[in-house]
């Protein structure tokens, strides 16, 4: 049980670490068009992101995929930027009638990229044979899922307050939040090691 808590807490801290806020930014960008009534779609997207993230760690831990750190560190803010731009240009349009397939595939793919960004560190703390690494990987994934749900609930509460108390329309909320995320992410991209 203690080992479970170690890796579960690592998963929590990985997402909730304010020093590495890219994960939180992506979740905020992903949640822009949603409200509490969309909880099934929200839970599906969050879980798909976790699956992509975990798959990337699995592929890396077992030596199936290796990727340069500076490339992944460049791609992570790009995934956030794409998500924010998507919601900026689709603000006010009803996404409920759209198939979730495209958004789901993109979410899994972005989860893969984010997982690869953490894989080098994760590999350094993993010891033992490959079979010894499987359970810690799953325990870590559960921590990530729990932390992501916490972040999503906070974002949905904030969206509810802004749209109900301050009378922002759903479209205005999407525009303001997308623009904010784009403004935060662009400097991250410009400062990337890939440009140096």
Image (spheres, rainbow, N blue to C red):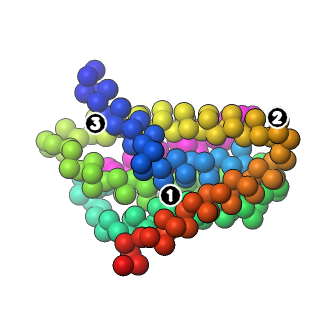
Q: Mark 3 points at which residue?
A: 136
Q: Which mark is residue 110?
A: 1
Question: Which residue sits at x=39%, y=38%?
Answer: 13
Q: Residue extending furthest left? A: 128
Q: Horizontal and vertical percent for residue 72?
A: 39, 65
Q: Residue extending furthest top? A: 1
Question: Which residue sits at x=20%, y=50%?
Answer: 124
Q: How crowded is mark 2: few (under 14 residues within 10 Å), some or many (20 or more)?
A: few
Q: Which mark is residue 192?
A: none
- Whether 45 is among the magenta residues is yes
Q: Quadrant of the C terminus?
A: bottom left
Q: Horizontal and vertical percent for residue 98?
A: 75, 54
Residue 146 seen in the figure: yes
Residue range in magenta is 36-58
Earlier along the polypeptide chain: callout 3 or callout 2?
3
Q: Which mark is residue 165?
A: 2
Question: Which residue sits at x=52%, y=67%?
Answer: 187
Q: How crowded is mark 3: few (under 14 residues within 10 Å), some or many (20 or more)?
A: some
């Amino acid at each position: 049980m203690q080992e479970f808590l170690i890796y579960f807490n690592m998963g929590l801290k990985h997402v909730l670490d304010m020093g590495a806020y890219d994960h939180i930014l992506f979740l905020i960008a992903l949640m822009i068009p949603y409200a509490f009534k969309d909880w099934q779609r929200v839970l599906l997207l969050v879980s798909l992101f976790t699956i992509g993230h975990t798959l990337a760690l699995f592929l890396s831990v077992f030596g199936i995929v290796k990727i340069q750190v500076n490339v992944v560190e460049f791609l992570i803010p790009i995934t956030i930027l794409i998500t924010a731009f998507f919601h900026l240009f689709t603000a006010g349009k009803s996404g409920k009638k759209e198939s979730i397939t495209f958004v789901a595939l993109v979410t899994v793919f972005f989860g893969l990229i984010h997982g690869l960004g953490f894989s080098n560190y994760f590999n350094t703390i993993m010891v033992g044979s490959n079979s010894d690494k499987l359970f810690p990987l799953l325990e870590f994934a559960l921590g990530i899922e729990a932390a992501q749900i916490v972040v999503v609930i906070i974002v949905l509460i904030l969206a509810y307050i802004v749209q109900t108390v301050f009378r922002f329309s759903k479209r205005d909320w999407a525009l303001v939040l997308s623009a904010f995320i784009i403004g935060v992410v662009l400097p991250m991209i410009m400062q990337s090691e890939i440009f140096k």
